[in-house]
Amino acid sequence: MTAPLTAYTGARIFDGHDLLTGHALVVHPDGLPRITPLTALPTGAKTRRLNGGILSPGFVDLQVNGGGGAMLNSAPDLDTLRRMAAAHRRLGTRAFLPTLITDTPAHSRAAIAAVAEALHLGMPGIAGLHLEGPHLSVARKGAHDGSLIRPLSNDDMAMLTDAVARIPNLMMTLAPENATPDQIAALTQAGVLVSLGHSDCDYDTAMRAFDAGARMATHLFNAMSQPNARSPGLVGAALDHPRVASGLIADGVHVHPAMIRAALAANRGAAEVFLVTDSMATGGSDITSFTLNDREILRRDGRLTLADGTLAGADLTLLQAVRYMHNTVGEPLERALARATVIPAQLLAHPPEADSVDAMIWINDDLSELHWLTEL
């Protein structure tokens, strides 16, 4: 006997662009969800009424350093990836890039091997790998270990070219001070998604790197050269280049809401600003401190810092970021949701699967709670 269709009604539905009312999410026996007007529900469908809320694809996060009490840097292996994936799934994230902060070549190779194996095994949630460093600017290192920062070498190029063959969604944050336009072009040609960040470069240098193939800016405004009247810096270049998308930490700590509004208004071209958590070991965990490269990071009052007060990642979920964008920045809810779902997904060479009921979440109307649709 064929399993009945299930029609979820009573909630708004985010289809990737708009928030729809007067529609149902109809789940077919094969698990594929389809959005259908209430006036055209299939005969015999079993109705499951939701009392308000929003149905949306789960979140996609391109910068996740840790979660569930674990940091990728501390143990770049399958167990760490499983802990991170489980923690971020509880927070509504269906796919993410585990992110290795500046570390040794051995740690980079271990992270590449672990993520490649996770992809081979089909580990849920793991979409690829983000290497944030070590080819950054010491002047804008933030919480990265300056002693490990170095120029991009031929050996590094070979390692990355080999890695992207096994990890199609491979993202690399670098600074143009430590990587040439020719190197950026070669990485892009090989399939690496190059992002500029932790850089003190000027506007012209950044634009040359973007023209060479870099397509993103990592955590816009943070750890990068700032704009002024005569020197737009990396911030200005990222917003001015028509093909560059920028990650944003929308937590009320990293970027002032007025600057976020200015960035959204100034962003040029089709490339969009998208939301990231820059989550650390605290994500999905109640721990109050952890270590990175033998340095303690403290969790206090909604922020993560080194002992000297330097910001070190964010104490943030994507649901909180969406709520901040909508309630504080003043962005329409459908745009805020897009910045945490379809926009980052579409930046990847191989976007994560979205056409499954397993990829759908339900969010309550005040954006304070979520559940996976299959677990309601």
Image (cartoon, rainbow, N blue to C red):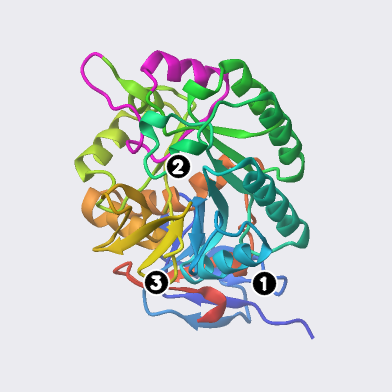
Disc on the earlier residue, 3 or 2: 2
| Residue 253 x, y percent position in the rendering | 25, 51
| Closer-to-camera residue (278/153) | 153
Report the side of 272 relative to 323 (left or right): right
Could you tell me the amino acid type at mark 3?
Answer: Ile
What segment carries the magenta color?
201-230
Callout 1 secondary element: loop
Where residue 316 appears, as percent x and y from the top left, is 36, 59
Q: Secondary structure at mark 3?
A: loop
Q: Position of residue 76 (x, y in %)?
A: 62, 56
Residue, far bottom? 1
Residue plotted at (39% across, 61% down): 317
The residue wearing badge 1 is 28
Quarter location, residue 297: bottom left
User: Is 181 in front, or is 295?
Assistant: 295
Using the image as rendered, state which of residue 371 and residue 249 is in the foreground: 249
Give the foreground label among 3 and 2.
2
Residue at the spot of label 3: 287
In the depicted structure, whether residue 203 falls above or below residue 294: above
Is residue 116 depicted above or below 218 in this figure?
Answer: below
Secondary structure category for the residue under label 2 = loop
Whole-percent x and y of residue 1? Answer: 79, 86
Decide whether the magenta segment is chiefly helix, strand or loop.
Answer: loop
Tell me which residue sits at (33%, 52%) in the image.
306
Label 1 vs 2, first from the N-terminus: 1
Residue occupied by mark 2: 145
Measure the alpha-carbon separation of dots 1 and 3.
Answer: 41 Å
